[in-house]
Image: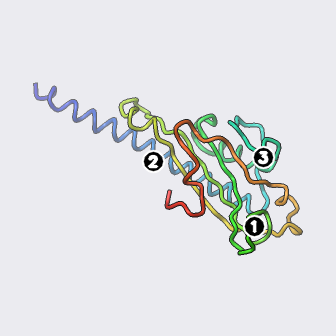
Amino acid sequence: MEFAMVAPVLFLLLFGIIDFGVVYSRQLGVRTSTREVTRKAVIGQFGGDPSCVMTGLTPSTNEPLKEIICSIKSDIPIDAADVRVQVMFVDSNGDGTADHTHYDDLMVCTMAQMHSATGFFGPVLNSNAHKARLTMLLEKAPDIKPSIPTLVAGGEAPLTGQDWAFCSPSAGPV
């Protein structure tokens, strides 16, 4: 009789620890991958194989953009179909343009679908997304690292029910 009264609270606590532990681990994976790939991209090392699953990619022909997206997707411990990436340049040198030139910033934003590991908290978690945004200064001038000018801003369509509003230089903390 006492167990019947305590069991629901015990299971709620147990499944909560499991679900939110997995969510926290995946959030760290999203942030870490975004940081590492952005760090490589600002020095002109875009990644490797540009042939991962991409959804609504614009522009669809830029190889360095595809390499950045696929590098992030391969690093995150989440199904690549549940991950979206956006890449843009931010005007940080005050010349009024945001492009690949020296002293502008590169911003990489990532979102990944949350999933409940136990299914118990599915209604709360499954409609949300892990989000990460990182901005870094481009460290190589185009004449030093010729591959940087070939990178163009772009990215994938957002996850269903999500948007890229957090992927803006003026957006608040993610």
Q: Residues within 10 Å of mark 3 (few under 14, many from 20)?
A: some
Tag 1 secondary structure? loop
* Along the line of sight, the residue nearer the viewer: 81 or 163: 163
In the rendered structure, which amino acid carries the disc numbered 3?
Gly
Instruction: Give the image quarter of residue 39.
Output: bottom right
Q: Quadrant of the N terminus?
A: top left
Question: Disc 3 versus disc 1: distance between alpha carbons?
Answer: 29 Å
Q: Which residue is mark 1?
A: 97
Tag 3 secondary structure? loop
Dot placed on the residue nearer the N-terminal end, 2 or 3: 2
Q: Which residue is mark 2?
A: 24
Left or right, residue 133 beside residue 156: left
Instruction: Give the image quarter of residue 12.
Output: top left
Where residue 115 sits: x, y (%)? 47, 35
Instruction: Give the image quarter of residue 120.
Output: top left
In the rendered structure, which amino acid carries the disc numbered 1?
Thr
Q: Which residue is mark 3?
A: 48
Left or right, residue 47 beside residue 75: right
